[in-house]
């Protein structure tokens, strides 16, 4: 088996493990959101204790791994994501990257704090198609303060080929 085939098998195995734990889609309550740190909240979703995020089902991607300051989502671009030119719509890139970089910021927030995206800058490097296979979006925190969080992200395929890069600025605020 080639190293690409081995890597693809590892990605598929990890995806199956994660999907087996996820609960159905829904929205957590404000009380559930406030019950722990940002990382605690994300872990509870990933462990199936809270509903999975509806946009992940809509766009066919899932959280695959994470730690404070670094979150990875895996998706399978398909023809349902195509634009009229026969490649994956830029909105798929943006949604996947916004999830990765936003959750990276969320993962370092203390209990009682939330965030929202103020600005998202995405550079598309090359087209995605259904033939690309699975991709991963990794978000990493650059800096998070009391009011602003900054993170960057990348979409790569199983070979490590770069498809897009993003930066975000998030507003950090106390949850109501």
Image (cartoon, rainbow, N blue to C red):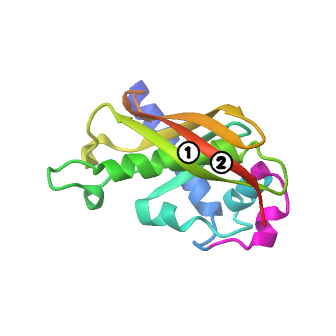
Q: Tell me if residue 72 can be seen.
A: no
Q: Quadrant of the N terminus?
A: top left
**Residue 43 horizontal side relative to residue 94, left or right:** right
Q: Is residue 154 above or below residue 45?
A: above
SS class, disc 1: helix
Q: Residue 81 is drawn in which quadrant?
A: bottom left
Q: Earlier in the sequence, mark 1 or mark 2?
A: 1
Residue topped by disc 2: 171
SS class, disc 2: strand
Q: Are marks 1 and 2 in contact (CB under 8 Å)?
A: no
Neighbor class of circle 2 (other Cα within 10 Å; few <14, some 14-19, many 20+) is: some
Residue 35 inside the magenta-drawn segment? yes
Q: Quadrant of the C terminus?
A: bottom right
Residue topped by disc 1: 100
Q: Residue at x 60, y 62 (%)?
A: 20
Q: Is residue 77 above or below residue 44?
A: above
What is the C-alpha distance between the residues marked 1 and 2? Answer: 16 Å
Q: Residue at x 67, y 57 (%)?
A: 46
Q: Residue at x 79, y 68 (%)?
A: 32
Residue 141 locus on image (x, y percent):
65, 34
Q: Tell me if residue 163 can be seen.
A: yes
- Specify start and end residues of the magenta stretch as a single range: 27-39
Residue 151 locus on image (x, y percent):
60, 35
């Amino acid at each position: 088996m080639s190293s690409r085939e081995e890597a693809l098998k590892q990605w598929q195995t990890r995806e199956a493990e994660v999907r087996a734990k996820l609960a159905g889609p829904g929205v957590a309550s404000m009380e559930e959101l406030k019950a722990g740190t940002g990382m605690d909240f994300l872990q509870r979703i990933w462990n199936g204790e809270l509903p999975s995020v509806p946009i992940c089902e809509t766009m066919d991607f899932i959280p695959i791994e994470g730690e404070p300051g670094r979150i990875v989502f895996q998706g399978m671009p398909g023809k349902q994501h195509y634009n009229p030119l026969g490649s994956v719509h830029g909105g798929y890139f943006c949604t996947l990257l916004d999830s990765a970089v936003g959750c990276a910021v969320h993962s370092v927030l203390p209990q009682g704090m939330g965030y929202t995206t103020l600005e998202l800058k995405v550079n598309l490097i090359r087209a995605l198609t259904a033939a690309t296979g699975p991709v991963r979006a990794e978000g990493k925190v650059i800096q998070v303060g009391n009011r602003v969080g900054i993170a960057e992200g990348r979409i790569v395929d199983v070979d490590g080929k770069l498809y897009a890069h993003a930066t975000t600025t998030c507003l950090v605020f106390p949850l109501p």
